[in-house]
Amino acid sequence: LLKLKTSRFGRQLRIRSKTESTQNEALSWAKEGAQEGALVLAEEQTSGRGRQNRPWHSPPGKGIWMSMVLKPKIPLQFTPHLTLLTVVAVCRAIKRVVPVDVGIKWPNDLLVGERKICGILLESFAEDERLLSVIAGIGISVNLDEQDYPEGIKDKATSLKIASGKEIDRATLVAEILYEWEQLYQLYEEQGFGPVRTLWEAQSITIGRTISVNTPYGEVNGVAQGLDESGALVLLGRDGQYRKVFSGDVHFL
Ligand code: BTN
């Protein structure tokens, strides 16, 4: 069905026609002992969620809504690496399959132009400061048409179909994502964050731009310079000071 080229990712697979959120399904599966790489795909989500508890619009049949179980052997504070790793993999896979100019907005949105095409949500589960599992969710607007978007997000989102003018085969794209993702995950296991950071920076549309980030501690403005070793975004302010942001939403100025 999926023509997998991977050895671990997607080898345990559950496909649902409708579910609340693939994040919930993957989590309960992880608790029942799913192996690393176990994947839940859904045609439709009735309460898909995004970062910061925002709803994620997941209409039937036109998107890729999926979540995978990861069991990385890394310290808890390294989980941002996985977010960045995942978005790099998705970005590379999309570029292989669809002729569109996608780029990464920090930390993990994929945009075409200024419009969002993909969002990524990682939820970590730890016990006694030890990371047990991470549920990595990916939402891609693949074959949505203009009329599939509700009012509030119409002008902020687009799909691969709208951007490229063609219908995309979702199974091919999923197989390509899993392949890129597994390769990069293996590289990360062997060599740490360095190579991922380089690849992320190469696909970034954030670096070099003047941005504002609304962090939990207030707004930070500056020109985006790059990532530090923890995955934080480094900004150079007009006062000549460097500042790091660890979470928040980026706005281009
Ligand atoms: C964001 O940009 O805010 C992240 C969006 C993540 C959406 C995906 S779709 C599959 C998985 N299941 C969910 O409920 N959310 C993620």
Image (spheres, grey):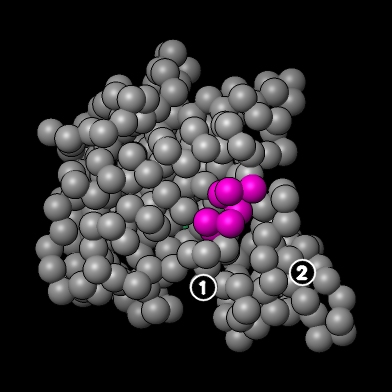
- Using the image, tell me which numbered label, if any, was put on residue 120: none
Q: Is residue 102 above or below residue 251?
A: above
The residue shown at (21%, 72%) is: 164
Where residue 180 sits: x, y (%)?
37, 44
**Residue at position x 52%, y 56% in the image:** 199
Closest to the camera, between mark 2 and mark 1, is 1
Position of residue 167 measured from the top left corner of the image (x, y, whole percent): 12, 63
* Residue at numbered disc 1: 205
Which residue lies at the image location 24% right of the left edge and 49% below the top edge? 173
Which residue corresponds to mark 2? 218
Mark 1 neighbour density, 10 Å: few (under 14) some (14–19) many (20 or more): many
Q: Is mark 2 within 8 Å of ligand 1?
A: no
Residue stretch rendered in magenta on the structure: 194-200
Q: Where is residue 123 in the image (x, y as percent from the top left)?
A: 54, 39
Q: Which amino acid does label 2 sit on?
A: Gly
Q: Can residue 155 be seen in this view?
A: yes
Task: State the residue in front, 219 or 253.
Answer: 253
